[in-house]
Amino acid sequence: MVSEGVGRSTQKSAFDAIDPPDTELYLDCIHCGFCLPACPTYRILGNELDSPRGRIYLIRSASEGKIGISDNFVKHMKLCLVCRACETACPSGVQFGHLMESARGQVKRNYTYPPAERRLREFILYYFTDADRLTWLLRGLRLYQKSGLQALVRASGLLTLFGRLGEMEGLMPSIPDLSLRHALPEMTRAIGPKRGRVGLLAGCVQSVLFPGVNLATARVLAENGYEVVAPKGQGCCGSLLIHEGERERGKAFARKTIEIFERAEVDTVVVNAAGCGSAMKAYGDLLHGDPQYATRAAIFGKKVKDVSQVLAAAPMNGKLGSVPLKVTYHEPCHLVHGQRVRSEPRTLIRSIPDSQFVELKESDVCCGSAGIYNLIHPTEARQMLERKLNRIAESGAEVVVSGNPGCLIQLDVGMKRRGMKVRVAHPVELLAWAYDAGAGEGGSKAMVRAVK
Ligand code: SF4
Ligand code: SF4
């Protein structure tokens, strides 16, 4: 335990005045260490400074001017997944996610990453926070996959010569038909008696790499009496930027997202990507110092709900048909720890006729995706992924379900690399297969055949 001897200091803080980590938050820590076994980085690295308690110690020391924003400080901040498993484990209610996001904001402004890492971060954040740019980038990569070149390059072993670039190629998901991104209608009418009018965040990565998830979300909500509005002009919610300490850019996206959904006049803003939902629910904290947006952001945050929360609030409408598959559930960190949504996705899976739900051991432990973590820290992310894949293999499931695009990519890539015959899906896709089956359509049978 490293906290002994950290007294109050009168030295100048290493942090600047813009959103510094809140003293009240780190003083909540009673140094009990209950969070250590829950922390994935502590579990694999075994270093106190890569534990929640160690990181809080570093943040407090920097805040009190005892240490600077040094290479060592940054290393331990960067290695954190911001998975927030420590918050779930903490008996003292330490809001670690807020602390870490503020600390990373300080790192962003007051530290210079080595040039190669800086370029990599800028590249990722430039393309993955804008659906148009991401589509443009993926066009070439889809050609690379579809032409068979990818299979040839992978078989040749050439990728090992390309270092980090070769590793990143190995993390590339299957790229869908990119035109499907535009298939989501701006308005989907409710089927049957209307329960409400909801907005749907299309998302950057979700809309480009998982257009089927957005279509399934709108369809399943409509089946359950919701009119679904996916406003044109919506963009990035800022979650990836906030996660990485780019708070000012994240705030700009947050303001725009609030405006778009205010104009849509919806009762609820539905999100099907856990990382986005977690950030949007916390817009009130993010924008608390903004006189124009503070109140609007707090009101907006209360309207945000994960799709599983909306759908599990009442029994499913309509006719769900048989989907005879063995299904397990991997919990996205930003759903289970960030939003404390645990039972709702399970309720939805269990509502599907003839599916067999099996619990996944360590279901709430991070898969290593964590925003851009798997690209910045491939070695640590791979260790977490391999452990997760072992648990999935032990479960005997044919489908692993998860409500976050980063997790879906990470699990799918890992299972394909291992040759596992397990399909990944979002919970709403499973429900859409069941509605297909209920309507006597062949879609779900084809899906079941494909899985088997
Ligand atoms: S957020 Fe996750 S990785 Fe970071 S300290 Fe907490 S448990 Fe560990
Ligand atoms: S469990 Fe909470 S109070 Fe205990 S060491 Fe971890 S962060 Fe601090």
Image (cartoon, helix red, strand yellow):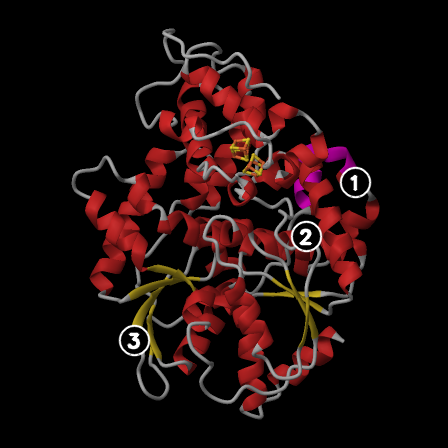
Identify the residue under disc 3: 196
Say what amino acid the circle numbered 3 marks. Answer: Gly
Q: Quadrant where the N terminus lies?
A: top right
Marker disc for residue 362: 2
Amino acid type, residue under disc 1 in the picture = Leu
> Dot 3 lies on which element?
strand
Along the viewing direction, whichever of 263 and 155 lies nearer the viewer? 263
* Closer to the eye: label 2 or 3: 2
Q: Residue at x 41, y 39 (%)?
A: 242
Nearer-N-terminus badge (1/3): 1
Q: Is residue 163 magenta?
A: yes
Magenta residues (range):
160-169
| Front tag of 1 and 2 | 2
Q: Which residue in the rendered view is the most extreme toward the top?
A: 11
Q: Position of residue 361 (x, y in %)?
A: 71, 56
Q: Is residue 448 above or below residue 39?
A: below
Which image quadrant shows ligand 1?
Answer: top right
Report whether residue 429 is seen: no
| Residue 395 falls in image quadrant | bottom right
Magenta region, mostly helix, strand or loop? helix
**Do callouts 1 and 2 mark residues in contact (Cβ within 8 Å)?**
no
Mark 1 and mark 2: Cα distance apart in space:
36 Å
155 versus 351 height, above or below: above
Looking at the picture, how far across and down is residue 346, in whole percent?
57, 68
**Secondary structure at numbered mark 2:** loop
Label 3: few (<14), some (14–19) or many (≥20) C-alpha neighbours in 10 Å:
some
Q: Measuring from the top left, give residue 114's x and y in whole percent.
A: 55, 20
Dot 1 surroundings within 10 Å: few (below 14), some, or many (20 or more)?
Answer: few
Residue marked by disc 1: 158
